[in-house]
Structure formats: C-alpha cells, structure tokens
Image (cartoon, helix red, strand yellow):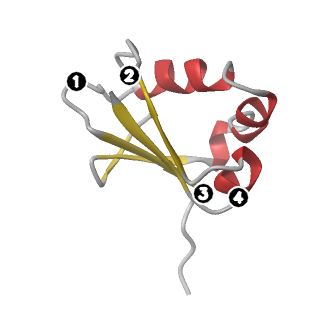
Amino acid sequence: MIDVLYFAWLRERIGERSEQIETDAATVTELVEELRTRSEAHALAFSDMTAVRVAIDQDLAAMDASLAGAHEVAFFPPMTGG
C-alpha cells in the first residue's frame, strides 16, 4: 500500500488530496501510467508531465526513481521563487 498525495491544481483536477493504492509499479513513471487509468480526471492531471514534480517520502525525485520501500509519493507543480 502506498499513499499518493496531490497538491495545487493536481488536487483540483483529481478532486482528492490523497489516496491509498495497491500497486506493483517499480518506478514513478509506472505509477503515473497506472494512475492515468483510474479516471478521466487522473488522465487529465497527468497529461503533461513536464508540469509535474514528484517527491518520494518527502524527498524530491526523478520520474524514473524506484518506488522500492516507498510509503508516500507526492505530485505537485514546479515551485517558483520570488
């Protein structure tokens, strides 16, 4: 079981802050592909991955990062400075 968290416009598009899912995904990319099939809202939220960042257990990660041992995956838009 893995906790998937959504922030900002991802949360708005999906309509949920988080969900717990059972997954066999080995990488973030595989998880995203699985999430896209959950609903039209998920497919829309993950349609442009250049606008999405990810953290695994609260550490920034790449899309090809391993999910081995992960408890939490968070998706959010890029942060801007100012």
Q: Kindly identify which numbered label has been placed on residue 27.
A: 2
Q: Considering only order in the chain, which callout, 4 or 3, is on the residue closer to the N terminus?
A: 4
Q: Secondary structure at mark 2?
A: loop
- From the viewer's perspective, is the residue at label 2 or at label 4 nearer? 4
Q: Residue at x 70, y 34 (%)?
A: 42
The reply to whether discs 3 and 4 touch (Cβ–Cβ < 8 Å) is yes
Mark 2 → mark 4, Cα distance in angstroms: 23 Å
Mark 2: which amino acid?
A: Thr
> Rounded to the nearest whole Å, what is the CA distance between mark 3 and mark 4?
8 Å
Q: Is residue 33 above or below residue 57?
A: above
- Is residue 11 left or right of 43 when viewed as pictured? left
- Whether tag 1 and tag 4 are in contact, CB under 8 A, the answer is no
Crowd rating for badge 2 (residues with CA inside 10 Å; few <14, some 14–19, many 20+): some
Which circle, 3 or 4, is nearer the viewer? 4
Q: CA distance from mark 1 to mark 2?
A: 8 Å
Residue under numbered circle 1 = 68
Instruction: From the viewer's side, name the closer residue of 4 and 48.
Output: 4
The amino acid beneath tag 3 is Pro
- 63 and 33: which is toward the camera: 33
Mark 4: amino acid: Trp
Left/right placement of residue 36 relative to residue 18 reads right
* Residue displayed at 68% across by 35% down: 46
Q: Earlier in the sequence, mark 2 or mark 3?
A: 2
Which callout, 1 or 2, points at the residue further toward the start of the chain? 2
- State the image coordinates of residue 13 (x, y, percent, origin top left): 76, 49
List the residue tagged with mark 4.
9
Tell me if residue 30 comes above or below residue 49 in the rendering.
above
The spot of residue 8 in percent (x, y) is: 64, 63
